[in-house]
Image (cartoon, rainbow, N blue to C red):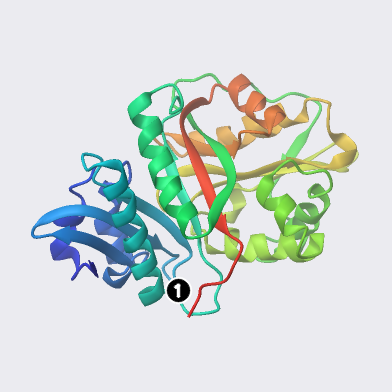
Amino acid sequence: MRPITGADELDLFTRFPYVINHELADDLTEGRRRPEWMWVALRGDRLLARLAWWSRPDGDAPQLLDILDLDDSLPEAERLDIGERLLRTATAATLTPGSTHPEYGRFIPPDWREDPAARRAVEDRMTVAERTGAQLFVERLRLEWKPGTEIAPPGDRLTFRPLKNPDDPAELIDLMTAVLDGTLDAHGRDDLTRMSPREAATAHYEEEFAHYSSPRDWWRIAELPDGEPVGFVIPAHNGYNATIAYIAVLPAHRGRGYIDELLAEGTRVLAEQDVPRVRAATDLGNVPMAAAFRRAGYVNFERAINMTWASAVLS
């Protein structure tokens, strides 16, 4: 069990199929991955298991465990034991004792529960993580809009504008703070158990949106004719795809269908950039948001699971 030596071993590392294999070479080049964060379990030259962490290019420590694969042809007990040993070994060598475990995330088929082979693969990987103390945090829908799908024309209820000062996040953070009241988002709700709404909004902005290289003048605030804000949408490019990174309606204005106009505006901004697709995601349990995406022509092409560890990394 060892980390790969570098990009020269990507052919070895990608022997197992996975939907982000094609991104790994660029991730290494751009600093989103490091060879010492990409581990393999081998028997001779046979790949038995693999895992990898990811971070933003300026990150000095892993931020997400997003690859964990097993040789599904091995007997169940053997493949689970190898996966567990690899995860424990790589964690001990890679993560700082006492630090927080990065979340584990995996993209999975939308019908994974109905497909026996897919279900076994998903549950095996969850079992490996569970054996080291992880538990399921949330299941999410991954959504996609394709060019040619109709976008609802602008209505007359709302007007849209960019931030007053794109270089000053205060206006957006104020709105992000307000929309946490009554949020259905699992990550947002978890944040509120550990910090104030303002702290949660600021951390979200600094950890995600501040890193986007796409223009901030894409971001839109929705207002009533009298200038009262109703909500906002953040169309962006996350380095992989155009995405609706965040969309929300302020609590006082929920339940009036404004979400559809916000989503149409955000999609329109990205469609005008001639992108090949627009991606988005929402929690499986966020039924109103999922319904809004369906109405806007977004297709559920994948799901994702997120698992978390309650305890710190052991020494």
Q: Position of residue 174 (x, y in %)?
A: 80, 58
**Residue occupying the far left of the picture:** 44
> Are there few (<14), some (14-19), or many (20+) residues within 10 Å of tag 1?
some
207 in relation to 274, above or below:
below
**Residue under the point 69% across and 25% down:** 154
> Residue 11: in sight, yes or no?
no
**Residue under the point 47% across and 43% down:** 242
Q: Nearer the viewer, residue 108 or 90?
A: 90
**Along the horizontal axis of the image, is 94 left or right of 306?**
left
**Occupied quadrant, residue 288:** top right
Q: Position of residue 229 (x, y in %)?
A: 83, 44
Question: Helix, strand, or loop for circle 1?
Answer: loop
Q: Position of residue 178 (x, y in %)?
A: 83, 51
**Residue occupying the far front of the picture:** 77
Q: Position of residue 50 (x, y in %)?
A: 28, 56
**Along the horizontal axis of the image, is 58 left or right of 198?**
left
Q: Nearer the viewer, residue 151 or 90?
A: 90
Identified by mark 1, the residue type is: Ala
**Residue under the point 32% across and 60% down:** 27
59 in relation to 215, above or below:
below
> Residue 312: in sight, yes or no?
yes
Q: Which residue is mark 1?
A: 61
**Along the horizontal axis of the image, is 170 left or right of 295?**
right
The quarter of the image holding the N terminus is bottom left
294 in relation to 18, above or below:
above
Tally the numbered discs. Answer: 1
